[in-house]
Amino acid sequence: MGRTEFVALMAMMMAAIAFSIDSILPALPTIAAELSPDAPQQAPLILSMFLLGLGVGTFFTGPLSDAYGRKPLILFASGLYILGAAVAWAAQSLEVILFARVLQGLGASGPRVVSIAIVRDRFAGRQMAQVVSIIMMIFTLVPAVAPLLGEFIIHLTGWRGIFLSFILFAVIICVWMSFRLPETLPVEDRRPMRLTLMFSAVKEMAKHQVVRLSIFVQTLIMGCLFLTLMLVQQVYDLVYARADEFPYWFFLVAILSGSAGLLNALLVVRFGMYRLVTLALAFQILFSGAFVLFDLGAGPYGFFFFVFWQTTIFFQAGMTLGNLNALAMEPMGHIAGMAASVIGALSTVGAVLISGPLGTMIHGDERLLAACVFVLAFVGCLTMLWMGRALKKQAVG
């Protein structure tokens, strides 16, 4: 497999996650009306349950692929993903769909973690950094087009067709990988999976203050992002009566927000990770506070103020999550692989536990949504100031 084909396959594996989340957004009102008419606020849990499975699975997929090989793990995880999609397609109740989405999330955690491990197996140093950068650049485009693609599928087949498209997506990945990609982890290099080693890594990370605080702030920021994803379609529909326009505005917001990663790459060398995260949270406090205080979502220009505010949420994620991950990983170089799994699992599951209950209570109230983000950003900013003192002590030590 040449480099171009390899990058395309790895990008498709990573894209499965964004496609599984964002393409289903236009279907939420129809699913709620058909399966949960008395409690439409429960429909966004379709996103939360997928993310919950994704977070839990992230903890195990890395070590499992180290023990049994990359391809077997991805094939098994893809099978679980396909099973979840098939159960959701046939579901006659929202509860069954929620269970199926947990299965899908567990399955999606395989490609999420193992694709990067495969890149690491094949490349090193600057070549690895170059390949990962190209993969992530392609990956950032998927959230922009996924709602449009989802809207097209729903128009042709109804909302159940979305789950069939998930199955097709996973089958293409499995067939492509099976015939074209050789196993990248030889048997002699595999390491047996030991739960004791995993939990000892968790204990070691828990003892490090900067690591603890980084994971906590990452959880809060991902909570802001997940909460917005859960409710944004409801706001477009219930508050602004623009449900038909939602995929197009989402496309614009995603494209604009995609520049955050590039801006962060340009600024982080000069200003540092800690300062950029703190500054991004401070700006979010300002934006969300003004949105709530002056009720900017109401009035003749309320919709455009909301679109701007939505953009700041996605932009904030691009300016913070990578930096926070790097801050947490910096002292954990000797257990980097296990640390990456733990950070991804804890922050994702924690964000779901924050956003899930809040999302079912807010139900399309744009001002209350902004107020929740304000609180999360405020707590995150205070935590970063606390981390600043810890970093100073660490530097002196």
Image: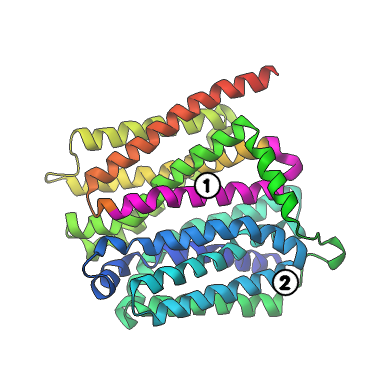
Residue at x 40%, y 53% (from the top left corner): 255
Is the residue 18 above or below the residue 218 in the image?
below
Quickly name the residue at label 1: 347
Residue at x 12%, y 44% (from the top left corner): 299
Q: Amino acid at mark 1?
A: Ser
Q: Amino acid at mark 2?
A: Met
Front-lying residue, 317 or 304: 317
- Furthest toward the top, the residue is 396
Q: Is residue 89 left or right of residue 175?
A: left
Q: Residues within 10 Å of mark 1 (few under 14, many from 20)?
A: many
Please provide percent x and percent y for residue 109. Answer: 58, 62
Q: Is residue 304 left or right of residue 385?
A: left
- Is residue 69 on the magenta stretch? no
Q: Secondary structure at mark 1?
A: helix
Is the residue 363 above or below the residue 383 in the image?
below
Quickly name the residue at label 2: 1
Residue at x 42%, y 46% (from the top left corner): 223
First in sequence: mark 2 vs mark 1: 2
Of labels 2 and 1, the one closer to you: 1
Q: How is the image coloured?
A: rainbow
Is the residue 45 above or below the residue 285 in the image?
below
Front-lying residue, 261 or 316: 316
- The span picked out in magenta is 331-360
Q: Is residue 183 visible?
A: yes
- Is residue 337 on the magenta stretch? yes
Please provide percent x and percent y for residue 128. Answer: 71, 53
